[in-house]
């Protein structure tokens, strides 16, 4: 199979045709067309100008029709890349039951699925799990997918933590309720049309600048938490029922001098459980909802101070131009805010995440997840690529959101009594040091060391069975 070389970096063919056969019958044929990274100029130069560089591409397929059957094997194979281009790892439909670590050295990787409902990475770790060396995983390493590299992009993938939830409507102290589906610790990361499925601590938005668009996040307690500076646009947040209620966010800003915070634009907050819109994990926790639909699932008070009244003066919980049965603020805590246009400006602008400095055009194939799930988030007022969302993000998003809410069949649960929630921090036990990859991949053998110049496994079809 021919290979392309750019400088000293080995890349894989951009157009590839492969077939697999089982028992003499052709079962599947996959064509990998020219990478949309080339079409959309999804490559960043040192001057933050997007240019068309050749993009590497490897294929992961659970049925053996790709270069690899494991996502981690594909990540391990690609060399540490220059930040001026993305390496595309195409993941074909299937459920990949493995723990995936993308270390700091593997910058500029894109994981791209064909359909977020069919391409699933799932694992069952949880914070209280003890490793063979005696250390406890903790929340930080409970992630099914752990991303520590910068310039990461994911498109059309479900990230799931399949650890069982606490027994419903019990004392909810069952083993390991804190279980992360994905942790993103690198900066300049973007997620398009992805699902994040879990219970407590579903999405660990740990640190860095991040952008989420057309995503679905599901959980019951702190299912978006961390200390990142992130904008969520056109996303659905689904709260699952829990005896004592829960919270959508637990943002960890610890000082008003820090810039971190979560902003939710044109999104939908719904579910069948009762939740606070946010609770103050950090002393200066910050979360802002703008132009969003909020269903009748909000706990009395709207927001929670983590049981510490001293945080009222430094926490910033706010809403701007939202609507829906959950937006009646008459019973909300007095230290929350309802913003006017001028006050909302720093948050509704894409400059909140310095988007002009790093965020590229919308990847091809993204943008249909929420519609697939029965919700309609209409982006007709946002200009299409190549000016998406705006040229250098110099303008403010439109002030009149085009969003229609189509509720799921499940009705919101009755309002339960409020009760303290368990924090998203690791439970008692020794602190886990930075683990090796092999110690994290429980039950999964460490990949063999391969020279970077070695070609990927062949896609040639095996001989038919006789």
Image: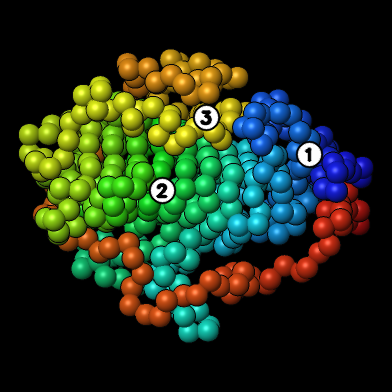
Residue 315 versus residue 243 in the image, above or below: above
Which quadrant would residue 261 be assigned to in this image? top left
Q: Name the side, left or right, on which 80 lies relative to 259.
A: right
Q: Is residue 211 visible?
A: yes
| Residue at image location 47% in from the left, 43% down from the top | 209
User: Residue 228 got which mark?
Assistant: 2
* Pointer 1 residue: 29
Which quadrant would residue 457 be assigned to in this image? bottom right
Q: Tell me how far mark 3 sits from mark 1, CA to CA.
A: 39 Å
* Pointer 3 residue: 356
Mark toward the viewer: 3 or 2 = 3
Label 2's element? loop
CA neighbours of label 3 inside 10 A, class few (<14), some (14 to 19), many (20+)? some
In the rendered view of the protein, which quadrant contains the N terminus? top right
Of 42 and 447, nearer the camera is 42
**Mark 3 or mark 2, earlier in chain:** 2
Q: Tell me how far mark 1 sits from mark 2, CA to CA.
A: 41 Å
Residue 290 versus residue 165 in the image, above or below: above
| Residue at image location 60% in from the left, 19% down from the top | 386
**Mark 1 or mark 2, earlier in chain:** 1
Residues at discs 3 and 1 in contact (Cβ within 8 Å): no
């Amino acid at each position: 199979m021919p290979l392309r070389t750019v400088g000293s970096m080995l890349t894989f063919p951009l157009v590839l045709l492969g077939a697999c056969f089982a028992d003499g019958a052709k079962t599947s044929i996959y064509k990998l067309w020219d990478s949309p990274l080339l079409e959309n100029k999804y490559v960043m130069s040192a001057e933050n100008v997007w240019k068309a560089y050749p993009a590497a591409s490897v294929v992961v397929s659970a049925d053996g029709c790709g270069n690899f059957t494991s996502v981690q094997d594909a990540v391990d194979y690609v060399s540490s890349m220059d930040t001026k281009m993305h390496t595309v790892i195409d993941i074909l439909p299937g459920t990949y039951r493995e723990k995936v670590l993308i270390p700091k050295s593997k910058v500029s990787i894109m994981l791209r699925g064909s359909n977020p409902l069919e391409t699933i990475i799932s694992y069952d770790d949880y914070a209280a799990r003890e490793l063979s060396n005696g250390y406890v995983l903790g929340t930080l390493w409970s992630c099914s997918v752990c991303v520590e590299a910068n310039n990461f992009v994911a498109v059309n993938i479900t990230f799931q933590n399949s650890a069982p939830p606490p027994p419903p409507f019990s004392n909810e102290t069952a083993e390991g309720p804190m279980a992360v589906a994905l942790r993103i610790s690198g900066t300049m990361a973007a997620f398009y049309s992805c699902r994040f499925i879990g219970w407590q601590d579903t999405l660990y938005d740990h640190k860095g600048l991040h952008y989420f668009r057309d995503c679905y996040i599901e959980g019951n307690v702190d299912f978006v938490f961390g200390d990142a500076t992130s904008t969520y646009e056109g996303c659905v947040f689904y709260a699952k029922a829990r005896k004592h209620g829960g919270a959508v966010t637990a943002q960890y800003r610890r000082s008003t001098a820090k810039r971190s915070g979560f902003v939710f634009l044109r999104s939908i907050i719904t579910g069948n459980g009762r939740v606070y819109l946010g609770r103050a994990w950090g002393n200066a926790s910050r979360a802002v909802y703008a132009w969003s639909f909020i269903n009748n699932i909000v706990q009395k008070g709207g927001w929670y101070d983590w049981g510490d009244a001293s945080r009222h003066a430094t926490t910033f919980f706010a809403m701007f131009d939202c609507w829906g049965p959950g937006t009646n603020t008459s019973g909300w805590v007095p230290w929350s805010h309802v913003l006017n246009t001028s006050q909302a400006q720093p948050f509704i602008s894409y400059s909140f995440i310095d988007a002009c400095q790093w965020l590229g055009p919308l990847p091809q194939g993204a943008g249909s997840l929420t519609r697939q799930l029965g919700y309609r988030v209409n982006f007709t007022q946002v200009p299409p690529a190549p000016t998406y969302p705006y040229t250098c993000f110099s303008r403010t998003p439109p002030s009149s959101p085009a969003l229609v809410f189509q509720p799921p069949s499940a009705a919101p649960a009755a309002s339960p009594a409020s009760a303290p929630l368990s924090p998203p921090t690791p439970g008692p036990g020794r602190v886990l040091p930075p683990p090796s990859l092999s110690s994290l991949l429980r039950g999964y053998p460490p990949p063999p060391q391969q020279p970077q110049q070695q070609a990927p496994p062949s896609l040639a079809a095996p001989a038919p069975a006789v």
